[in-house]
Image (cartoon, grey):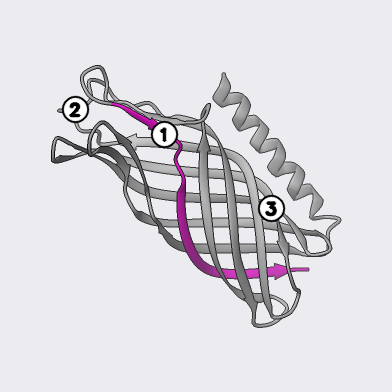
Amino acid sequence: MKKSILFKSLCIMVIALISETTQAQTVELTASYGYQFGSKSNYGYNNYVKINESDQFGFTLGVDMFQGVMTEVSYTRHSSSITRRENGQTDRLTDLYMDWITIGASKYITKDKLRPFIGGGIGAAIFNSENANEYIFDYPIDTKWYLAGTIKAGVNYMFNEQWGLNVQGNLMIPIQWGGVYFGTGGAGVSGSSNILIGGFSGGLVYRLK
């Protein structure tokens, strides 16, 4: 039920944003590829559960609303894995695929060829695991949905009125009552903490008036 309501809400937000393009001056499309640094949750003495570093790719649809503010819908994908270190031994737990869908805004500081910006958004993070370590987990790990927030800053360099390059750093924050939980079935260890996943990316920008 919770997942269904969240998914429907996100669809409504996307449709509402797209409908604004009929009234806005400019639509901005950004495709990017980059790297995310992972995140680690410590427990006990020198033990941890870790989301490993990986690549990332994403797409952003923005609508130029007023005074350099872009209203945006963004999608980012991480293909990673989770490992655990316990008693000096490191084990692979599972592959992890993270999908981030957010709606938010960015503010251009200038409108010259070089355009620094800051922004953020809120939406959903979907964590889906595959190929779980059968020697550690008692049962398959379910797909998890979390409320999520994002923060970003970067710069676009525009070659002309339509095409440009994008470079940015971003911080992804899944939220679940102050923490995110990783469990190992009924027989292993678990850890919980706030998770912050940082990364950077570069890509192409296309502006359509």
Indicate yes or no whether the magenta region holds residue 31.
no
The residue that mark 2 highlights is 136
Measured along the vertical axis of the image, is residue 49 above or below residue 170?
above
Could you say whether the residue bearing mark 1 is in a helix, strand or loop? Answer: strand
**Could you tell me the amino acid type at mark 2?**
Ile
Between marks 2 and 3 in the image, the one whose residue lies nearer the viewer: 2
Location of residue 91 in the rendering, given as x and y in whole percent from the top left corner: 17, 39
Residues 166 and 117: in front is 117
The residue that mark 3 highlights is 72
Measured along the vertical axis of the image, is residue 139 above or below residue 49?
above
Please identify the residue farthest to the front as the structure is shown: 45
Residue 193 is labelled as 1
Determine the residue positioned at 59% across, 66% down: 154
Location of residue 193 in the rendering, given as x and y in whole percent from the top left corner: 41, 34
Q: Quadrant of the C terminus?
A: bottom right
Query: Of marks 1 and 3, which one's residue comes earlier in the chain?
Result: 3
